[in-house]
Image: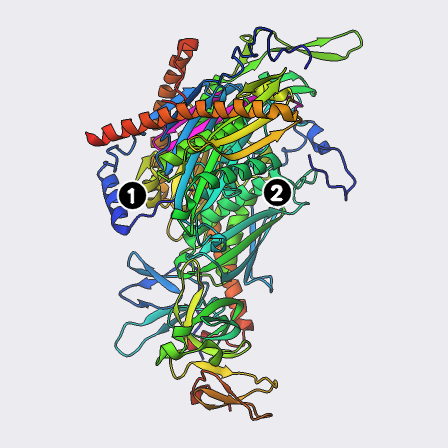
Amino acid sequence: MASVVLSEAEKVYVVHGVQEDLRVDGRGCEDYRCIEVETDVVSNTSGSARVKLGHTDILVGVKAEMGTPKLENPNEGYLEFFVDCSANATPEFEGRGGEELATEIVNTLYRIFSSESTIDVKSLCINPREHCWVLYVDVLLLECGGNLFDAISIAVKAALFNTRIPKVRVLEDEEGSKEIELSDDPYDCIRLNVDNVPCIITLSKIGCRHVVDATLQEEACSLASLLLSVTSRGTFTCMKKLGNGSLDPESIFEMMETGKRVGKTLHASLQKILDKEESLGTTRQKVGFLG
Amino acid sequence: MALDHRRVPGPEESQAPLLYAAPGEAGTDAPGREAAALRPLLARAGLLSQAEGSAYVELAGGTKVLCAVRGPREAAEGRGRLLCEFRRAPFSVRGARPRPGPATAARERELGLALQEALAPAVRLARYPRARLELTALVLQDGGSALAAALSAAALALADAGVEMFDLVVGCGLCRAPGPGGAWLLQPSEAEERAAAARLTVALMPGLNQVAGLLGSGQGGPPESWAQAVRLGLEGCQRLYPVLRRSLLRAAERRAAEGPRAVGASA
Amino acid sequence: MAGLELLSDEGYRVDGRRAGELRKVRARMGVFAQADGSAYLEQGNTKALAVVYGPHEMRGSRSKALHDRALVNCQYSMATFSTGERKRRPHGDRKSSEMTLHLKQTFEAAILTQLYPRSQIDIYVQILQADGGNYCACVNAATLATIDAGIPMRDYVCACSAGFIEDTPLADLNYVEEAAGGPQVALALLPKSDQIALLEMNSRLHEDHLEQVMEAASKACKDVYAVLDQVVRDHVHEVTTLLGE
Amino acid sequence: MAPPVRYCVPGERLCSLEEGAAGSGTYTRHGYVCAALAGCLVKTSEDGALPVVSVVRDAESQLLPDVGAIVTCKVCSINSRFAKVHILYIGSTPLKSAFRGTIRREDIRATEKDKVEVYKSFRPGDIVLAKVISLGDMQSNYLLSTAENELGVVVAHSEAGAQMVPISWCEMQCPRTHSKELRKVARVQPEFLQT
């Protein structure tokens, strides 16, 4: 990851600031940076979203392709995650340099989507044992300025919200052979219910307090952080300690409380933005990277 | 899909017949067990002669983990590094042999990283500049709570290797029984783990009372339920600690008795 | 190509352009803050992102350092969702490696590398959406990013493709026209001095027509130049007024 | 008879800081001395002073080259600027895996550094006593120095293959051919000589 080198004095400055609930960029400990979300930015995909969180820039594309259901779940479709830590973010990621981080992110994504209620995978089934939709969720890391996991989870949720899967019908003739017919109407499509898709809240322990949405500088001051994936109802689907430090048991319980509180607010405002964009429909001015 | 032509190509995917077993056949082996009950644990440090340090941990009911530490070896980086590898023996899991491939490797890497991040706070890495410690945890048999057993074994192996540490690390696994209001069970068996709605592994440094690692996912319900699980897990770790400690002391005594240069006399 | 008319009798192409007309080119410089230079460019529906790091100390093995000039290091990658059919890998396949090499050669010809001996300049381009003319969009985006990074160049590098269908040279092919399999020329030009930085042609074209196609391509490159130049001037103007305040 | 030996494990509190000072294999935290190793507890008290609490293991297997340590190494290659060596021993403890080190030309001897030539000081295969002066940075490995009388070549073989005997601080002689070869010879201290 793009690393910043902080001197001892700088670290002390950051830690003391956090102690006073005043961070280097003027935020409080539970404030996010300004989040920019835009959906439907890549027209080749079934759904896409770009999220900019401070200097962290994420582009997610979802492609629905037809595949065969997994043997153990014959009447369900499934999601496949792929993360590309592109060299755009930092030259260290050139070639295979970003793979280690990419694997870590992919594993975390699988983990937070592992619970059955997250996405209704049954609706992705076309006909059991034979055809289903496979949603390839491809995450492209364009710039990293701290708090990758949260930004990625927001982008994934926005992209899944934006995803439109064409409706198909299964036609069966007398001999029992099946044929799949794609709907002619491009507006006739399945939408996914993303109400239960969680967002990741990473709480970084700095000094004896914790902050949400740490910048790169703050991440350099933090030895350990707690990753929580919180649904819109405030339940957790995943928790994980990150980093090479340890945490006090009491601070973990505090962090969980904060995570729940912040998570609920984050979900509410994200849903509001997505609904607003949705209501504008085609009249929306697409900004993309030109804005 | 790249095929390995040196082998007889089997089907692309295969399933163990266990999948089709009627529900309730398995998983009923411990009906109504007490939630806070721990499975008896056997720990033994220093059993491999080639590695600098090693440990073996077995949980009653069939989880067997072997851990070995090599190093400190020379490294290119300036700071000391701890490299952890988590591997499952091909015969370790119930049912079909896992197909070696990128998916399996990625899962093992996640657990390896969890192992590393949980042990790093306990090891005094500052004492090992320009060196790396290599740790391998091999799961011989997975009967549930494999990561927790690996964590305990890894800490024992590091201590056995004479690596300077702040504290030991004890791991404890938990899972939440399916259904609403399901209770959290300590150190679940493989069947319980498979049926569980949520799983959690906690790692504790018992002397310092610091949580070294936390990894869990699933439908654990509201934060209060998770918090309770963490508490329960930490308590479990505290209860396991004496067993691990004793095994380490025994290893130290054994070494002192065998070693020709017994230093005990100088005390 | 049966059933698809690439050039109508009235002289219009599938997307309604005239033969020598470019797709709409839109671009923005300075997209990212952390990189030394960055640019985003849309050429019709082809979208490319370029980022420049450097000149900086050699990364990795120092033995690759050139004692008299800077090493230009490129990587071309395509987002897995950029194409119609999902790509399995963003980079590292044969086609991407070839593109990487082409980019490297193009920019070695344009950047004044002798000013930075023993150092390295990284140019990373990413195709976000592919609709024909990927190489050209990448070169144009990378030019803007290099300018944004403040690295001295001999001239802009402007690239454009051209094809030849039904005895007419077509400028700036889109995906449909590329897929038709006709002859195709990709040209990277230093427009002020009319020097060719890279020229690639595939498929079969009669020698007599080559000049015509080249003419079309170089005209298209100069049209691209006009657009890029405007983008750069606007950007510089914007930056200087911001600084002036 | 010796008193019963107390064994301890990492993280165990041994005593408070008032009762003892932290020795090797221990660390201090919140005013207590805690064990960092699994081994047995040793208290050494010098008259009047606080007893030093340390934890020792049977074998010091985990030593790493540290700045100031005297190491024994084997020269593996030389060029005009430096000699590359493998560190084999730290003090009298063998290392399980060799660490690489470098002796730069200017660190070979203390005087007339500019006149030193590496090939007149070391040859590949020589066993050299040296001192660690730096752990090095990202590019280089351990930096060693032989700029002391007691440091330098201790064992060397002549071109004829016989082990040479030192005849001065800069020369060694082959007992078989009586040819002299140049080396930066260490003055081996008598206590290290095995009788």
Label 2: few (<14), some (14–19) or many (≥20) C-alpha neighbours in 10 Å? many
As drawn, is D152 to the left or to the right of C5? left
Where is mark 2, residue-wise?
A: B143
Measuring from the top left, give residue C241's x and y in whole percent: 23, 28
User: Could you tell me which residue is drawn at 42 percent across and 35 percent down?
Assistant: C51
Is residue C209 among what the camera can see?
A: yes
Q: Is residue A66 magenta?
A: yes
Residue that label 1 marks: A208
The residue furthest right is A175
Instruction: Work out which residue is located at the far front of the displayed protein and give it.
Output: C208
How many numbered circles does the render carry?
2
Q: Is residue A277 magenta?
A: no
Q: Residue at x 56, y 8 (%)?
A: A188
Q: Position of residue C140 (x, y in %)?
A: 45, 29
Q: Nearer the viewer, residue C25 or C131?
A: C25
Is disc 1 in contact with disc 2, using a CB cutoff of under 8 Å? no
Q: Secondary structure at mark 2?
A: loop
